[in-house]
Image: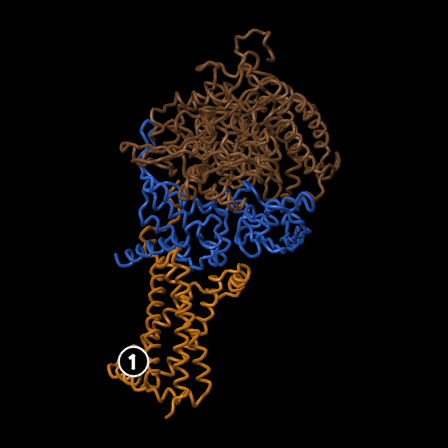
Chain colours: A blue, B brown, C orange
């Protein structure tokens, strides 16, 4: 028998002077294979067309639909209602700027991050269209991709205790991004260069090891291992700098 | 109102748009990309399989070269493509893959030594050469003579998009995300930029540019079920067709992908079949080898989708509450391969279907996937009809895909075309001077403000935008699907005309303040129905079957009468039907029309006598 | 474009202390963990026999290690507090944030951190009292300890509270160091958690038994 689902959804439209932050409830009959993507769209189309939320690929690939689902940051598109109780509470991801209702501005946050960590290959080599590609071991390529898989949904940031307390913290997504370039042989930056970026409390040493990032990551990125690896690596650089003078 | 000036305005920040912006930025011009979503969420990121480029590094790609790639592409297009464009594409693809490697894409690389692979469910041996160790590897895809598809696991689009977006960040290409262009500013001869709506505040902004580029991807969302992302709603096309001057090319050429999952229509990559996955029917028996002894599961997508539909019609489909479907079997590829090179497929199956593809079959059926048609451009990417307007990527009809695109050719097109068109834009900008006419700008802004107010205040009526949209999608699904007939299309057009009348009467239920999603949908609906009409009218007129356009009443490919490209115009805002014109499919023939080698179809030759018409 | 426009000179940056302080926090924690276990075993030796405990205490006092080591441990204790306090929210606003965050998230490791931070505050005060009380009244003799406890029941209550708090703080600290510095990876995390749970139980058990041994010790 189909359940009747009650959605408690955070509502606030900052562009509407009469709107104030509040929770609003919507009731829907559950259908077969229902996901939050299906449910939220039905609420918008049948009950309240002003409801704001973000979906894009709706296949768990693009990272648009991060929201707090019954307390846990996650991707709404691949969350099936049958895995949830009949009472479902949806909140926008904290840390990010609110656009309205469940929609937040992850774009600006991450764009700033790219500039902070300079998330591109730093090389003095100039591309030669006539030359064959530089060789790389397949294993190396695969290990880079393993870290490149992050979809920047912002769940790890929203789940991070440090990020909630200090706005300049790079978060797991940011630190992992540096790790991705650190293992890439094409990037000519030195350990010292990376240390400049993440060797602070804004970076790896700000991490308190609560591991919520590891536990909520919808792509199961190896964040715990990556953060541990970078803390040791940057820790050693810190000691070298300290005693090397 | 905020007015922003830039040399190049790119509408859309997916791979094609960003790649073009990079060329302009490298030439010293300022570039801004507008995007509905943060650029890395663009639908390019969802392309899993890979990019075709004739590098010929892997054993099964030995002897590959751009000529072979070109010939595969022309055959794949069923001779509907512009051969000059396809040639440029094939020649430039390998260089572009290497450039991406230089920029940081972690391409899969050749591992020397003996290995095995699956084809049609059987195991074969291969040996990779030591001398090719560490060069860019390729996998097999449909409709190709060689293994040619470069890949990054099954996150190729994701990885390439992130890399290209990184280069944009490095070069200072601005991305204004959560910004939607709602109309082009032009004086009938030159495009001056666009009026855009901010999706953070709902305010309008004016972007002025010497060159504007439409790179908004496909428009699959005019169909009810599609693999396309929610944002692939044709917003960019609508701004172009609303000019009344810029034509849409080959809108009837719509690709259905063989393996959309049932239900939810999410795509599982062609890489599944490329890596040796098979299609099974209700009896869990293969059938593609019966229809296509040579290419089997790896014939081109139009052919496989057609046979699958045919097979289901024969009663061999698997019954389900969501309609009949078939099975995709990748179990024999093994756990390591499935959770490694097909990891995304594994995740989609487990989290959306509750199916474990290591031990279970995946329910699939042909699903709307790609629009070969779009804003018609010349080979430089310049749109027909308006100076200073360009288009690139899936949004454009550049036209290297003709009536069917090969798997791995579209993701490759984004960057290859982006590079080529981007260079042309940079050339266009050298010394180009534009005089912006403030009267034209103000008039366009006023028009858009009025349009928005009218919809909010329900001036023309109170039609529900979501119901109108559903009616349009339903009409297309019924009338302009994989198999098409005169009756079906005629009815489809009649329904769409009624829908158009309703779309013009849409009014909001909500207050329309801020980033109102109902308003966003309402501003697009009329344009979407117009696109649906261009598609179905083009399909009704085209009395032949070519590539993915299948007329059951005209099953032959007719090179005598239809070796042409449809150009659809919406001449006047008040028109109820598009105006269709035609041009030759290609100016230059490197390969004359012939047999594709798969997809058994009758061909009416270009020099056939008129009596045989309609056979 | 890739050059940073901030005026920080590289050599200034390289002197940044964040990493060194993080090391110091971890090492001071490790030092205190080692000390506490040794401490627990030394005092716990009373379970075997008060004489053994007295001998051990005497050895440390005769060699002067208690007189010198005691204050040193106190310094280490304070240093650890100062170092770890860099991450503890002292402003009400931040405390509210982290509390709401923990309540929202239903995430065990986040709660563990809240426990860690709160036990730290209590241990700071109680530990200081304990150290002052013991070090200002050397030598340490089993009977004297027993008398102190028996004379004033508040001391028993004091230690019955302090001992579990310390061991919980220690256990979580050990777990946190291991995962934070990557000594335990994703694969080891579950096992580590189980190990730490057992460790806390055993340590608390030994400590409580020790306290009761003093409580029931007859003159």
Q: Check the picture and name the quadrant holding the N terminus of chain B.
A: top right
Quadrant of residue B51 within the rendered picture:
top left
Q: Is residue B171 left or right of residue A238?
A: right
Question: In the structure shown, which secondary structural element does the residue marked by tag 1 occupy?
Answer: helix
Q: Is residue A190 left or right of residue B248?
A: left
**Residue B216 visible in the snapshot:** yes
Q: Is residue A36 left or right of residue B96?
A: right
Q: Is residue A173 left or right of residue B497?
A: left
Expressed as whole percent of the image width and height from the top left, the position of residue B248 reads 58, 23
Q: Check the picture and name the quadrant holding the C terminus of chain B.
A: top right
Q: Along the line of sight, which residue is nearer the eye, A82 or C68?
A: A82
Expressed as whole percent of the image width and height from the top left, the position of residue C59 reads 26, 82
B389 w.r.t. A146: above or below? above
Seen at 52% across and 10% down, the residue is: B606
Q: Along the line of sight, which residue is nearer the eye, B77 or A111?
A: B77
Expressed as whole percent of the image width and height from the top left, the position of residue A145 reads 39, 42
**Residue B213 visible in the snapshot:** no
| Other-residue count near label 1 (Cα within 10 Å), few / some / many at <14 / 14–19 / ≥20 | many
Question: Can you identify the residue that label 1 sits on?
Answer: C66
Seen at 34% across and 83% down, the residue is: C46
A120 w.r.t. B371: above or below? below
Question: Number of numbered discs present?
Answer: 1
Q: Tell me which chain the residue with mark 1 is part of.
A: C
């Amino acid at each position: 028998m189909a359940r009747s689902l009650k959605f408690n959804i955070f509502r606030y439209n900052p562009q509407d002077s009469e709107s104030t932050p509040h929770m609003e409830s919507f009731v829907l009959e559950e259908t077969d294979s229902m996901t939050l993507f299906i449910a939220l769209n039905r609420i918008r189309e049948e009950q309240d067309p002003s409801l704001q939320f973000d979906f894009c690929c709706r296949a768990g690939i693009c990272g648009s639909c991060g929201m707090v689902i019954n307390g846990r940051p996650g991707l709404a598109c691949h969350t099936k209602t049958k895995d949830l109780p009949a009472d479902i509470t949806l909140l926008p991801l904290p840390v990010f700027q609110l656009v309205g209702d469940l929609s937040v501005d992850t774009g600006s946050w991450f764009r700033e991050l790219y500039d902070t960590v300079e998330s591109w290959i730093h090389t003095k080599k100039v591309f030669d269209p006539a030359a064959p590609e530089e060789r790389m071991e397949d294993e190396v390529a695969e290990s880079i991709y393993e870290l490149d898989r992050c979809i920047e949904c912002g769940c790890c940031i929203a789940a991070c205790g440090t990020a909630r307390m200090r706005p300049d913290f790079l978060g797991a997504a940011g630190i992992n991004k540096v790790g991705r370039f650190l293992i890439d042989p094409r990037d000519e930056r030195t350990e010292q260069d990376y240390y400049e970026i993440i060797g602070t409390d804004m970076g790896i040493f700000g991490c308190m090891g609560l591991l919520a990032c590891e536990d909520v990551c919808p792509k199961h990125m190896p964040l715990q291992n990556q953060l541990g690896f970078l803390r040791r690596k940057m820790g050693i650089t810190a000691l070298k700098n300290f005693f090397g003078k | 109102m905020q007015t922003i000036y830039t040399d190049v305005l790119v509408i859309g920040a997916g791979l094609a748009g960003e790649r073009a912006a990079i060329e302009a930025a490298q030439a010293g011009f300022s570039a801004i990309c507008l995007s509905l979503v943060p650029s890395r969420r663009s639908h390019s990121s969802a392309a899993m399989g890979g990019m075709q480029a004739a590098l010929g590094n892997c054993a099964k790609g030995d002897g590959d070269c751009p000529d072979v790639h070109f010939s595969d592409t022309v055959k794949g297009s069923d001779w509907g493509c512009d051969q000059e464009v396809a040639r440029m594409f094939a020649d430039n693809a390998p260089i572009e893959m290497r450039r991406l490697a230089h920029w940081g894409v972690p391409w899969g690389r050749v591992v020397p030594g003996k290995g095995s692979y699956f084809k049609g469910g059987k195991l074969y041996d291969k040996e990779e050469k030591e001398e090719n160790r560490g060069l860019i590897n390729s996998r097999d895809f449909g409709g190709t003579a060689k293994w040619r598809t470069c890949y990054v696991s099954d996150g190729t689009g994701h990885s390439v998009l992130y890399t290209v977006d990184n280069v944009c960040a490095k070069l200072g290409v601005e991305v204004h995300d959560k910004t939607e262009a709602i109309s082009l500013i032009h004086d009938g001869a030159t495009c001056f930029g666009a009026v855009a709506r901010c999706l953070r505040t709902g305010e309008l902004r004016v972007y002025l540019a010497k060159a504007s580029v439409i790179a908004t991807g496909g428009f699959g969302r005019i169909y009810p079920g599609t693999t396309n992302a929610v944002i692939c709603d044709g917003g960019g096309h609508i701004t172009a067709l609303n000019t009344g001057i810029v034509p849409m090319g080959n809108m009837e050429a719509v690709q259905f992908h063989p393996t959309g999952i049932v239900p939810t229509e999410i795509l599982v990559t062609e890489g599944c079949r490329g890596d040796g996955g098979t299609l099974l029917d209700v009896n869990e028996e293969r059938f593609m080898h019966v229809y296509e002894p040579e290419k089997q599961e790896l014939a081109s997508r139009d052919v496989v989708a057609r046979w699958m539909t045919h097979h289901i019609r024969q009663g061999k489909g698997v019954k389900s509450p969501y309609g009949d479907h078939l099975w995709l079997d990748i179990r024999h590829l093994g756990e390591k391969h499935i959770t490694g090179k097909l990891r995304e497929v594994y995740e989609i199956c487990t989290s959306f279907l509750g199916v474990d593809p290591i031990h279970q079959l995946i329910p699939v059926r042909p699903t709307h996937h790609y629009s070969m048609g779009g804003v018609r451009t010349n080979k430089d990417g310049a749109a027909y009809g308006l100076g200073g307007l360009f288009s690139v990527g899936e949004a454009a009809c550049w036209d290297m895909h003709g009536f069917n695109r090969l798997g791995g050719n579209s993701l490759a097109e984004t960057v290859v075309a982006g590079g080529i068109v981007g260079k042309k834009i940079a050339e266009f900008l050298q010394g180009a001077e534009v005089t912006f006419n403030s009267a034209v700008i103000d008039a366009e802004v006023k028009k858009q403000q009025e349009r928005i107010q009218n919809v909010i205040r329900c001036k023309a009526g109170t039609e529900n935008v979501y119901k109108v949209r559903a009616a349009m999608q339903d009409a297309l699904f019924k009338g302009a699907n994989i198999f098409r007939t005169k009756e079906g299309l005629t009815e489809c057009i009649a329904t769409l005309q009624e829908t158009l009348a309703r779309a013009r009467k849409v009014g909001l239920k909500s207050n329309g303040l801020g980033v109102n999603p109902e308003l966003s949908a309402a501003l697009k609906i009329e344009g979407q129905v117009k696109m649906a009409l261009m598609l179905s009218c083009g399909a009704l007129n085209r009395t032949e079957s070519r590539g993915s356009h299948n007329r059951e009443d005209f099953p032959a490919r007719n090179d005598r009468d239809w070796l042409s490209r449809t150009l659809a115009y919406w001449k006047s805002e008040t028109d109820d039907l598009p105006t269709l014109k035609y041009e030759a499919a290609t100016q230059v023939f490197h390969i004359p029309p012939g047999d594709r080698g798969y997809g058994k179809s009758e061909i009416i030759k270009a020099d056939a006598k008129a009596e045989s018409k309609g056979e | 474009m890739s050059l940073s426009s901030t005026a920080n000179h590289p050599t200034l940056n390289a002197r940044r202390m964040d990493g060194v302080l993080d090391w110091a926090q971890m090492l001071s924690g490790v030092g205190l963990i080692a000390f506490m276990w040794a401490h627990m075993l030394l005092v716990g030796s009373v379970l075997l026999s008060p004489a053994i405990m007295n001998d051990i205490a005497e050895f440390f006092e005769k060699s002067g290690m208690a007189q010198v080591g005691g204050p040193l441990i106190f310094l280490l204790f304070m240093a650890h507090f100062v170092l770890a306090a860099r991450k503890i929210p002292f402003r009400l606003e931040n405390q509210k944030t982290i509390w709401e965050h923990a309540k929202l998230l239903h995430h065990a490791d986040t709660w563990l951190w809240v426990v860690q931070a709160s036990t730290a505050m209590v241990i700071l005060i109680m530990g200081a009292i304990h150290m002052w009380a013991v070090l200002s009244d050397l030598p340490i003799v089993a009977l004297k300890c027993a008398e102190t406890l028996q004379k004033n029941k508040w001391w028993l209550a004091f230690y019955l509270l302090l001992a579990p708090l310390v061991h919980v703080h220690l256990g979580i600290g050990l777990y946190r160091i291991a995962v934070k510095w990557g000594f335990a990876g994703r694969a080891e995390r579950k096992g580590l958690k189980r190990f730490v749970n057992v460790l806390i139980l055993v340590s608390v058990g030994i400590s409580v038994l020790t306290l009761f041994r003093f409580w029931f010790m007859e003159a």
